[in-house]
Amino acid sequence: MVEQIRLGRTELKVNPIGLGANAVGGHNIFPNMNDEMGKGVVRTALEQGINFLDTAFLYGQGRSEELIGEVIRERGGREKVVVATKAMDNKPTALKEAVESSLKRLQTDYIDLFYIHYPDAETPKDEAVGALKKLKDEGKIRAIGLSNFSIEQLREANKDGYVDVVQDGYNLLKRDKEKDILPYAKEHGISFVPYVPLASGLLAGKYTKETTFSDALRANHPMFQGETFVANLEKVERLREIANAKQVEVAHIVLAWYLTRDAIDALIPGAKQPEQVANNLRTLSVHLSQEEVDRIDRMFQA
Ligand code: NAP
C-alpha cells in the first residue's frame, strides 16, 4: 500500500507518483495512440495504486476525459481517485460551462482539481479564479489550479489567496521556474505540479544520438535538435552512475529528485504504455541522500 500525501493545503490525498494523461485519448498530440491503448494505461495506473490522474479538455478535445471517466466507472471507487482536468476559456461563464461539460465526460458529480489551462489576454485573473471559488463552494470542484501563468499573472490571480495548485513546465533541463514561481508557491502554501517532468522522455535515459522521433512535439522541439540534443544526452548520462548504484533507472532518480524540492508534492509523468506506468512507480523506493540531491542540482545548473 502506497503512502499518500496531501497536495499542498487541499484535502486531496495522492500517491506522489501520478499519471499525466495527455497520451490517453490525446490522439491530436500523439497520433500513434488509440482509445484502447489509452484505457490500458489508465487501468494499469489505478490497479498499481496510482490515484492522481491529470487530464484536460485539450487532450483529444474531451476524449481523454471520456476514456478516464469510462475506466473509473468500470472499476468503481470514484472516491479513491483524484482527477485533475483543465479548461482553456478563462471567462467566468465559460469556466462554469467547462466544469459542467467536464463533469459529464468524466461521468462524475465533482472534479477534484480544476485548472485554468492557459491565461487569456482579457479576463482579469482574480475574476477567473473567483468563478472557480464559487464552483468550489458549490462542491463542483474541490481545488483550484492554474497552469502556464507568469508570476505577475499568478500574483493577480491569487490576490484573495484562493489558488491551491500551480502546474507549469519544469524539469532538470528547464529550471527557470525556480526563479519566481516555485518560491512564490512555497511562500503561499501552493502545491507546484511540474509538467513534462521527464522532458518528454529525454530524462528517462533511454535515447541515443541515433534516436529519431515521429511525433511533431519532439521532432520539432529545440531540446531534441543537433548539438543541444547531444549536450542534453551527455548531461542525462551523468545520472547513470547514481541510478546503477541504487539498481534503478535514470528516470527514477530524476523523478525522486523532484520530490525533494520545496512545494512539489506529486508528479504526473506521462506514459504511452502500461509498463511505463508501473515502472515509474519504482521511484517511490528511491532515497536520495542530501549529498546526492546537491550533486544532481549541480550537474544540471545551466
Ligand atoms: P513527460 O512526462 O516528460 O514524458 C513522458 C514520456 O516519457 C512518455 O510518453 C514516454 O515516451 C516516456 N516515458 C515515461 N515513462 C517512462 C519510463 N518509465 N521509461 C522510459 N520512458 C518513459 O512528458 P508529458 O507526458 O508530455 O508530460 C506529462 C504530463 O504533463 C502530460 O501527460 C500532461 O498531463 C501534463 N502536461 C501539461 C501541460 C500544461 O500546459 N499544463 C503541458 C504538457 C503536459 P515514449 O514512450 O514516447 O518514449
Image (cartoon, rainbow, N blue to C red):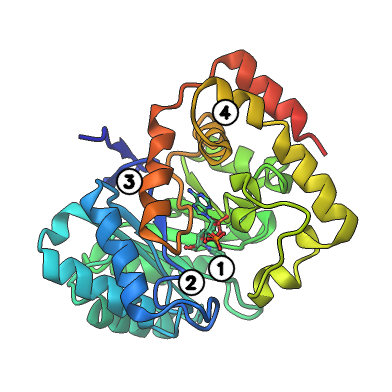
Q: Which mark is residue 125?
A: 1
Q: Are marks 4 and 3 in contact (CB under 8 Å)?
A: no
**Closest to the observer, 252 or 12:** 252
Which label lies toward us, 4 or 3?
4
Q: CA distance from mark 1 to mark 2?
A: 5 Å
Kindly check if marks 4 and 2 are in contact, taking CB atoms under 8 A apart as contact. no
Q: Nearer the viewer, residue 263 or 273?
A: 273
The residue sitting at 61% across, 24% down in the picture is 242
Residue that numbered label 4 is attached to: 243
How far is disc 3 from disc 1 in space, using C-alphas? 21 Å
Which residue corresponds to mark 2?
Answer: 128
Relative image position of residue 175 (x, y in whole percent): 71, 44
- According to the picture, the residue beneath numbered tag 3 turns out to be 10
How many C-alpha atoms fall within 10 Å of the one at disc 4: few (<14), some, or many (≥20)? some
- Which quadrant is home to the N terminus? top left
Q: Amino acid at mark 3?
A: Thr
